[in-house]
Image (tube, helix red, strand yellow):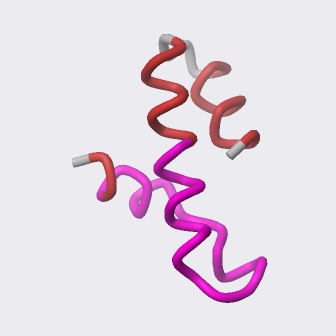
Amino acid sequence: FCAALALRLAEGAGYREAVAFACAAGAHAATVRGAEPGLPTRAQVDALLS
């Protein structure tokens, strides 16, 4: 969550958009077993948001 939030803020996204992105990243991580496999790709997060 924190890394995804920082990424979007660094890219210049607004706070709401950055938080939505971070929530999607966190949601993906919660659906996969294991620390490393749970790290979503950008495409996976974008797919959750679409």
**Residue 38 locus on image (x, y percent):** 64, 75
Residue occupying the point 43% across, 54% down: 45
Left or right: 43 as drawn, with respect to 26: left
Number of numbered callouts drawn: 0
Residue occupying the point 54% across, 14% down: 15
**Residue 1 locus on image (x, y percent):** 68, 46
Residue 8 vertical position relative to residue 45 in the rendered view, above or below: above
Residue occupying the point 65% across, 88% down: 33
Residue 46 lies within the magenta run: yes
**Residue 25 locus on image (x, y percent):** 54, 53
**Residue 43 locus on image (x, y percent):** 40, 59
Left or right: 44 as drawn, with respect to 5: left
Left or right: 50 as drawn, with respect to 22: left
Q: Residue furthest bottom?
A: 33
Taking depth in this image into account, of 11 and 50 the one nearest to the observer is 50
Q: Which residues are magenta?
A: 23-47
Taking depth in this image into account, of 23 and 44 the one nearest to the observer is 23
Residue 22's image quarter? top right
Residue 31 lies within the magenta run: yes
Residue 20 vertical position relative to residue 15 in the rendered view, above or below: below
Residue 23 vertical position relative to residue 8 in the rendered view, above or below: below
Left or right: 37 as drawn, with respect to 44: right
Residue occupying the point 67% across, 20% down: 10
